[in-house]
Image (cartoon, rainbow, N blue to C red):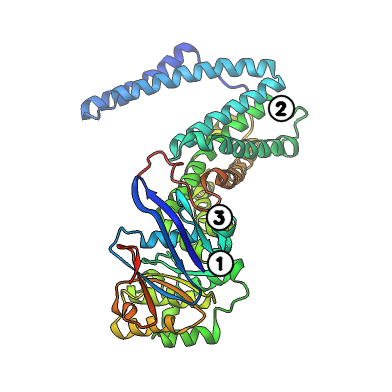
Amino acid sequence: MEIIDISLYSLLLAILLLAVPVFLSRIYGLGLTKLLLSSAGRMIVQLVLIGVFLKYLFLWNNTVINLSWLIVMILAAVFSAIRGSAMKPGKIILPVFVSFALATFTVIFYLNIFVIRLDYIFDARYLIVLGGMLLGNSLRGNIVGIDLFYKSIRKETKKYQYLLSLGADYHEAVKPYMRESIRLALKPTIASMATIGIVALPGMMTGVILGGASPEVAIKYQIMIMISIVVSTIISVLLTILMTSGVCFTKYGVLRNDIFLKNKTE
Amino acid sequence: MIRFENIDLAYQGNNVFSDFSLEIAQGEKVVLLGKSGLGKSSLFSLILGFVQPQNGKVFFNENRVDERIVWNVRQKVAFIDQEISIGDYSVSEWLTFVSGIKANHSLSFGGKRLKELMDFFELSRDILNKDISDLSGGEKQRVAIIVSVLLERDVFLLDEVTSALDENLKKKTAEFFVERKDWTVVSISHDPVWLKNPWVKVFDLEKKTWK
């Protein structure tokens, strides 16, 4: 069973569906038309570019290029994670990158070597596609985790300092905050794991099934990817907190104020 | 015991101290007096390493408080902050947490001493199961005082610890801290129970002199 290609003409028919929200936006004065059209435009351009790019990536299937592209994807994830947080980029970009890279590479190579048992573990089809799924899905958790950790210590300066004054070392003093932020970072992923298949048919499965594989194969891939997302999220949140602490705390164990974007005086 | 030497300290451009010096000897009971904004609490923060002076030195036990020594200082000093914010713990959970800190492992946080202190500070047993956030201001202060005593340290930095207590408890608390000859106690307060106590030395932060 081969997937049915959509001709350009047919695709135009799909795009024509946009007329529905545009029409409704007009009638109900939703004011969404401009935003909707520009977003759709961006999406089409971005996807066309990545489509062309992936075509060649799969064609060449070169180790160096594949790995480089994965690194570019990680960098993009790092930037959007930092932009979503209240932290200054310059200070934390390197530790965040290292944490994301370690988490992503560890999980992907584990999958490629032990689970999928690829002969060529740098194969673009698996490396890039799985990498994208992991990064895309663990990103939100990461942002929540990092942000909450530093924000709550700043908000509870008095409590944090009290912990230090009780004789807690750095690790003991940040532990309650670490626990809370990792827990919240993982919650949505864990929750979506429980509803998958019933509430939502995930993109990964749709893709695999349309690609001609049987639902059994799709299910196996989906189980693998969901667990991998949880694993890579927890590794990267934990590593990010551990690795950024060196630049975010003074040697006295006190949180620096200059790591935040808005230096609000409290 | 504690010595401030030519301290310059400014927060966001606001000058708190310039060329400030003060020495507190072991066993002394000192009250820091002065309006808010004069840096009373900042002196505690300097000792505990929560802020660093732009110039000058802070000494604890003849050791300069630096990024290494400060961790040691925090294990020798019992500090009680003006507002006690601990979060979602019941009193007994909090006691377990504090005794679980590695530096406090050798201490006993339960048993006889705790009961004695609770009786002395007039707290009933059922408070142990209450959430700290549900306690009254006075109850929180007494819990914090009891924790500070259980830590078995001999230097106390007390920031307005009697403010929410009734007259009788205020007096009892001040006397409790002043009576122990071996304890060094620095208290921020404008309460007569501290200021009128004959054993207490008062340092006026406005005039920067002993009274």
Residue that badge 1 annotates: B61
Q: From the viewer's side, name the closer residue of A90 and B206.
A: B206
Determine whether, in the image, residue A246 is placed left or right of residue A58.
left
Q: From the viewer's side, name the closer residue of B68 and A195.
A: B68
Residue B179 location in percent, x, y?
A: 44, 85
Q: Chain of mark 1?
A: B
B60 shown above or below B192: above
Determine whether, in the image, residue B40 is placed left or right of residue A108.
left
Disc 1 residue type (three-letter): Asn
Q: Are marks 3 and 2 on the same chain?
A: no
Residue A211 location in percent, x, y?
A: 60, 26
Q: Are marks 1 and 2 on the same chain?
A: no
Q: Which mark is residue A122?
A: 2
Residue A189 location in percent, x, y?
A: 52, 46
Q: From the viewer's side, name the closer residue of A197 and B57.
A: B57
Kind of element beneath mark 1:
loop
Seen as rendered, the residue at the extreme top is A9
Residue that badge 3 annotates: B66
